Image: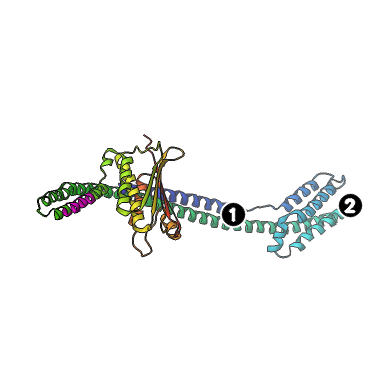
Amino acid sequence: MKSVQCNMIKKKQNTILFLLLTIFSTQAFALKQGAVNTVTESAVFSKWNKTESVYELQDSLTNGAYEKSIVEFRTFLDKYKHNNYQYSFYKSYFPNVDEKFTNIINYSNLLYSAVLKKNYSAVDTLRFKLLSAVTSWQNIEIASEKTVNDSYYSITIFFIIVLFCIVCVIVFYAATLTKSKLKEKETSEFSAVIQSTLENEKKRISLELHDSVAQDLRYTSILAGRLEEKNIAAEIEQNQNKCIEEIRMICYALSPPDLDNADLDSAIKTLCSYFKRSTSIEIRLTIIEGTNLNFKKEQALNIYRIVQEALNNIAKHANAEEVTLLLRNSESNDSLCIFITDDGCGMDEDFIRNINRDFCKINSKDGKMHYGIRNIKERVRQLNGKVTFTSYPESGTEITVTIPFNKN
């Protein structure tokens, strides 16, 4: 199953990368083609051609049409120089730009004067010089257009490459995340199998203790009653009864019989009673009226183990005098909320920040693995719930667990 899922991930990666390469190649080719197709006629040259087309008209010199077209051309030149951002660009990249453009203006002024004076031989000469000046300017515009296109092409290619790299990184991390989730799922399933096996083994050991060791101790008490020394017999029987009670507590901790009937309420009450008796720590249990504790047997066992593990951690590490355990429905009535609070020594803020992360190594200050917290988080994960640890040094600790109810 794992190999099939990994193959599917690789196929998706290859498909995305192939599409990206295709898009990249197509865009690069299109841009290259666009860069080759530069302009063949500048704005100034185009305006001059319109002016010259008026000259070709009959009687344009005598009826004032050509004169008017030269005035329009001259006005166009003024606007072009002062309102066109490209003019500044030309000056930055090409020599003698002002001189060449000034020649166009001067020749157009001289041409206008020649037309007004009806000096037709001068008109022809100035038209030729003006055409030469406009053509020289056109070369500048065409060269600049090519420079702009080449720059645009290079910049665009650069950004396409950057975008391609970013997408590749995203695809890589998406694939890594997917693999990580698959691995997490497999680890969680494997952990669930291990926990199920451990629970069965605990149940077996509990039965063995109850049916063999506890019975043997009772029989020893009966034998002690036959002794002539009644004081010694009473002392033996008292010690045996104490051992039997401790075995009963161990058996209950290993496999709570209440949970065979999914009676989570009774199991937690008995757990709290044994906790107080074995640790001498005061514990206050509150189960709000109407709290939904109707979980399936396996879920109820996980919830019981979460509370049991939390209480064991408090007994071992917290140095607490009092513990409060509260169970109630969430405000939206879609989950069970469990609050376990102690007045102990608390925990370091960095440690709390670490264990509240989804994935982390849970080590204590001496570097040893903190299995209690790890087991709590794993069982909460199996129940699709959420656990949060809140603590400050010398200020106690609160564990908040939220377990969603079954929807079906």
Q: Which residues are magenta?
A: 235-247
Residue 240 in magenta stretch: yes
Q: Nearer the viewer, mark 1 or mark 2?
A: 1
Q: Tell me the quadrant of the picture where the C terminus can be found.
A: top left
Which kind of residue does numbered mark 1 sit on? Ala
Whether residue 53 can be seen here: yes
- Foreground of the two, 138 or 77: 77
Q: Of label 1 and label 2, which has the lower sequence position? A: 1
Residue 385 colored in magenta in the image: no
C-alpha distance separating marks 1 and 2: 44 Å
Query: Which residue position holds label 2?
Result: 116
Q: Which residue is mark 1?
A: 35
Label 1 Cα crowd, 10 Å radius (few <14 / some 14-19 / many 20+): some
Relative depth, front residue between 241 and 62: 241
Most frequent secondary structure within the magenta stretch:
helix
Q: Position of residue 50 (x, y in %)?
A: 76, 48
